[in-house]
Image: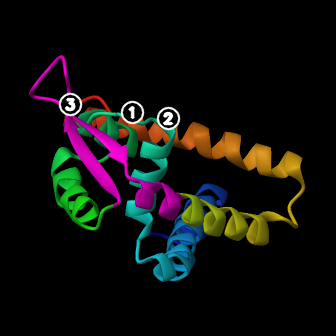
């Protein structure tokens, strides 16, 4: 780089990218710590919340919603099933498909975890005006769309 070129960290877009990445990292760290009392981690919470919202979703649909491969699901789901949080049942119309359901224990853990997550969100964002929260959400949603198209181009698979 010559002296006339600006350094990446001087650019507003670079600063924004780093801020988003650091915020994500810190949110995961704090959420991991707070979920420890329930003996679950953020990826488990993502699965549990999706099953809470979309009872009977297939493993493939869940992987698609979470933007992960089926191999990630095949590692996490047996652990959660063994722990009694979820159950997998065959689809009555297609025997190749497994549908996912929360158990009573899974529903209770999910509700407790959602309470922890909601309290964390409230603590960390309560000083931000709602219009700024919405602007941040809209900005992040645009970023997600852009990054999803990058992932699609790389993998040649739908995200």
Which of disc 1 and disc 3 is earlier in sequence? 1
Q: Nearer the viewer, residue 53 or 87?
A: 87
Q: Looking at this rendering, what residue extends furthest in the front direction?
A: 104
The crowd level at tag 2 (other Cα within 10 Å; few <14, some 14-19, many 20+) is few
Residue 41 at what x, y percent from top left? 41, 71
Using the rendered view, name the quadrant where residue 19 is placed.
bottom right
Nearest the camera: 37 or 118?
Answer: 37
Q: Residue at x 72, y 49 (%)?
A: 136
Asked if the residue under mark 1 is in contact with the one under mark 2, i.e. CB atoms within 8 Å, the reply is yes
Badge 3 local density, few (<14 within 10 Å), some, or many (20+)? Answer: few
Q: Quadrant of the N terminus?
A: bottom left
Q: Which of these two is toward me, 115 or 69?
A: 115
What percent of the width, then of the height, locates residue 95? 10, 25
Residue 128 seen by the camera: yes
Q: Is 76 contained in the magenta span?
A: no
Query: Pointer 3: what residue?
Result: 156
Q: Position of residue 82 (x, y in %)?
A: 22, 65
> In screen coordinates, is 53 left or right of 137?
left
Boundaries of the magenta span: 85-110
Q: Secondary structure at mark 1?
A: helix
Rendered image: mark on residue 117: none
Label 1: which residue? 149
Q: Where does residue 35 sit, x and y in percent of width and height?
A: 51, 75
Q: What is the C-alpha distance between the residues marked 2 and 1?
A: 6 Å
In this view, the residue in front, 151 or 30, is: 30
- Residue at mark 3 to residue at mark 2: CA–CA distance: 16 Å
Describe residue 14's horizontal placement relative to residue 127 as left or right.
left
Q: How is the image coloured?
A: rainbow
Q: Residues within 10 Å of mark 1 (few under 14, many from 20)?
A: some
Q: Is residue 149 above or below residue 24?
A: above
- Residue highlighted by disc 2: 145
């Amino acid at each position: 780089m010559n002296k006339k070129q600006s350094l990446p960290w001087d650019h507003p877009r670079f600063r924004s990218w780093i801020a988003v990445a650091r915020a994500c990292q810190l949110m995961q760290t704090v959420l991991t710590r707070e979920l420890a009392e329930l003996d679950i981690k953020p990826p488990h919470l993502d699965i549990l919340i999706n099953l809470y919202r979309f009872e009977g979703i297939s493993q493939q649909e869940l992987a698609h919603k979470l933007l992960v491969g089926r191999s990630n699901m095949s590692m996490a789901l047996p652990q959660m099933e063994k722990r009694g949080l979820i159950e997998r049942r065959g689809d009555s119309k297609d025997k190749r498909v497994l549908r996912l359901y929360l158990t009573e224990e899974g529903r209770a853990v999910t509700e407790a975890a959602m309470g922890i997550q909601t309290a964390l969100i409230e603590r960390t964002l309560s000083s931000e005006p709602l219009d700024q929260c919405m602007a941040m959400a809209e900005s992040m949603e645009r970023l997600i769309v852009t990054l999803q198209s990058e992932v699609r181009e790389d993998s040649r698979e739908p995200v």
